[in-house]
Amino acid sequence: MPPPTGRYAVALTDSEGRTVSENEFWVLPASAKPQIEVGRKGFFQNEPLSLKFRNAPGNRYDWVVVYPEGSADAGAYLAWSHTGSRIEGDIALGATEAVSGWPLPPGRYTVSLMADDGLSDSRFQNRLKSALDSNVGAPG
């Protein structure tokens, strides 16, 4: 039987009880599905995109990525950030995380939570959960 769901800490100690190394891990329910959400439906140009993710695998190189809506080109992502091996958290994507220029032009975009630096021509095999499409518009 698996342990109860939650966050756990583990420590390696030497023969004198001193901590040599520490780490943490999470146990999720078997039914947990990775999710990513956009902070709100629309953003103004130059405004960071606020994202929230949960139930991520927790791999070293899991990442969130922004694509133009409907893009089938695996290399067409516009901004990205690693999740920091976390299974849940908040990420803001802005000028620092942009691949080729910021701000994003007005338009519609899709954000995805991707597994362990997964990126190939079949990127949708690596996609864990699509989020809401987000509108980016010029300040009015």
Image (cartoon, helix red, strand yellow):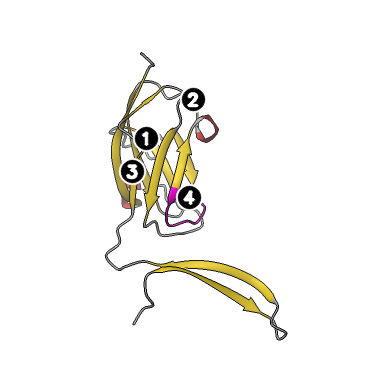
Name the residue that disc number 2 marks.
102
Give residue 83's mark. 4
**Foreground label between 1 and 3:** 3
Amino acid type at image mark 4: Thr
The disc, 2 or 1, on the residue closer to the chain's N-terminal end is: 1
Q: CA distance from mark 4 to mark 1?
A: 17 Å
Q: Secondary structure at mark 2?
A: loop
Percent x, y of residue 59: 47, 59
* Left-right relation of 21 to 25: right
Q: Secondary structure at mark 1?
A: strand
Q: Which residues are magenta?
A: 84-89
Q: Residues within 10 Å of mark 3 (few under 14, many from 20)?
A: many
Q: Main secondary structure of the magenta part?
A: loop
Amino acid type at image mark 2: Trp
Name the residue that disc number 1 marks.
67
**Foreground label between 4 and 3:** 3
Give the quarter of the figure containing the N terminus: bottom left
Comparing 4 with 122, the one in front is 4
Q: Residue at x 37, y 70 (%)?
A: 5
Q: CA distance from mark 1 to mark 3?
A: 14 Å
Q: Secondary structure at mark 3?
A: strand
Q: CA distance from mark 3 to mark 2?
A: 21 Å
Note whether residue 26 is visible: yes
The disc, 4 or 2, on the residue closer to the chain's N-terminal end is: 4
Where is 99 relative to 2, above or below?
Answer: above
Q: Quadrant of residue 115?
A: bottom left
